[in-house]
Image (cartoon, rainbow, N blue to C red):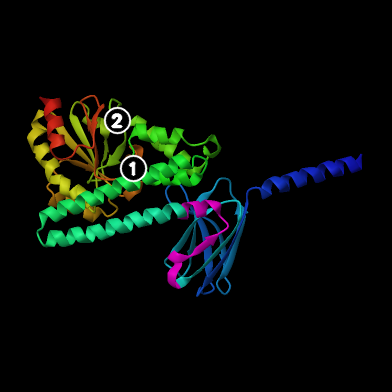
């Protein structure tokens, strides 16, 4: 009986160890020129980086061991270096070699996901380099006042944009079982409308449904669905410039342009005169603007309000991209806006220039 009990325990331990080894990773680093210092292994959390492990390097060498499920981007950071090494970690034996003088050229071996990502990134870098060269040529044409050449380079730049987007879309479709494809989709998710995003997410294999990136994409689908045209705008409360709480529902009974912006955002500041013009034209017809700032510095926020003559209600929690209202609405780029009717229902999104005036004319007249 004792032998049977011992055998059962032994088998359970062996099974447990065997199951654990399937998720084990081993990372060995060798960075030339690295002083003895603490090295950190991190991953992205909900709003910030999370430290998973730390070790002290010896003559540039360090190692990490642990468990991971599906492949995910991890980061190696240093106490005394203002730089990081980004790579896809996965259950494997991974070696990282490089030099402190050129950490961006660090070599990562042993991660199939990293190898796949580097292939994708190589082509993407080629396209971006072409766009950079065209941008410089555009600036030269602009300095010389050559409008014909400016138009030519604009068209070339936009054509490369289309090539880049098509390449990324194809990469995602060609690798439905790889979290790397989920990562690429998440990087470009701000460019996708709801239907496109649903199509992409539905194309992933069920085997990566629990990937961090696919989960993030599903969360974005839910946010876009909750802020789709025809849906009641999600409620939120935030402090105004005087530190007093203001709720979105306080403006019920008026048409409201919910405007996400920031003092540091050049396109936002460029659009502000158009919003001011619309506000002045329609404010006596039941229209107002509610500005939500993604600033972190209060002084910059207040100065921009005054300088741009933005005389409507302004809110901010001064959390930058972690702004609670912008996250609630799934805002990933600014300027962004939502036009709400008197009942708080979203009737239009991201109205710019003359389109804002045309929509307000249609709704209010």
The majority secondary structure of the magenta stretch comes to helix
Give the number of the mark in front: 1 or 2: 1
Horizontal and vertical percent for residue 102? Answer: 43, 69
Residue at x 16%, y 49% (from the top left corner)? 270
Mark 1 vs mark 2, CA separation in Å: 19 Å
Q: Earlier in the sequence, mark 1 or mark 2?
A: 1
- Decide if residue 43 is in sight here: yes
Is 299 above or below relative to 309?
Answer: below
Q: Is residue 64 magenta?
A: no
Residue at x 12%, y 37% (from the top left corner)? 354
**In the image shown, does 341 or 300 lie closer to the viewer?**
341
Would residue 274 appear left or right of 294 to someone viewing this image? left
Please state the extent of the stretch shown in magenta in the rendering. 101-118
Residue indicated by mark 1? 190
Specify the quadrant of the image occupied by residue 236: top left
Horizontal and vertical percent for residue 79? Answer: 48, 67
Is 99 above or below relative to 227?
Answer: below
Horizontal and vertical percent for residue 160? Answer: 29, 50
**In the image shown, does 64 or 177 lie closer to the viewer?**
177
- Decide if residue 224 is in sight here: no
Residue at x 42%, y 54% (from the top left corner)? 121
Residue indicated by mark 2? 233
Horizontal and vertical percent for residue 325? Answer: 32, 40
Q: Which image quadrant: the C terminus?
A: top left
Secondary structure, mark 1, is helix
């Amino acid at each position: 009986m004792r032998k049977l009990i011992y055998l059962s325990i032994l088998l359970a331990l062996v099974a447990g160890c065997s199951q654990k080894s399937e998720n084990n990773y081993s990372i060995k680093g060798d960075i030339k020129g690295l002083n003895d210092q603490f090295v950190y292994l991190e991953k992205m959390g909900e709003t910030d980086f999370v430290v998973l492990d730390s070790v002290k390097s010896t003559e540039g060498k360090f190692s990490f061991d642990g468990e991971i499920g599906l492949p995910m981007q991890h980061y190696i950071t240093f106490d005394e270096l203002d730089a990081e090494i980004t790579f896809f970690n996965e259950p494997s034996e991974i070696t990282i070699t490089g030099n402190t003088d050129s950490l961006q050229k660090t070599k990562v071996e042993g991660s199939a996901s990293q190898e796949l990502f580097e292939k994708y990134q190589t082509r993407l870098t080629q396209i971006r380099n072409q766009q950079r060269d065209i941008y410089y040529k555009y600036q030269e044409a602009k300095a010389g006042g050559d409008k014909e050449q400016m138009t030519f380079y604009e068209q070339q730049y936009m054509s490369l944009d289309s090539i880049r987007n098509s390449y990324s879309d194809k990469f995602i479709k060609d690798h439905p079982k790889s979290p790397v494809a989920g990562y690429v989709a998440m990087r470009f998710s701000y460019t996708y409308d709801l239907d496109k995003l649903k199509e992409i997410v539905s194309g992933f294999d069920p085997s990566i449904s629990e990937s961090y990136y696919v989960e993030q994409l599903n969360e974005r689908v839910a946010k876009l669905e909750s802020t789709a045209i025809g849906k009641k705008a999600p409620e939120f409360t935030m402090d105004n410039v005087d530190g007093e709480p203001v709720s979105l529902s306080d403006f019920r009974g008026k048409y409201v342009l919910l405007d996400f912006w920031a003092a540091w955002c050049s396109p936002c500041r460029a659009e502000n005169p158009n919003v001011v013009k619309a506000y002045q034209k329609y404010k006596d017809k039941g229209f107002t603007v509610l500005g939500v700032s993604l600033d972190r510095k209060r002084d910059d926020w207040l100065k921009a309000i005054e300088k741009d003559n933005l005389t409507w209600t302004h809110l901010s929690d001064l959390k930058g991209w972690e702004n609670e209202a912008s996250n609630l609405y799934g805002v990933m780029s600014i300027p962004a806006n939502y036009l709400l009717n008197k009942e708080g229902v979203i009737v239009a999104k991201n109205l710019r220039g003359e389109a804002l005036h045309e929509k307000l004319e249609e709704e209010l007249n």
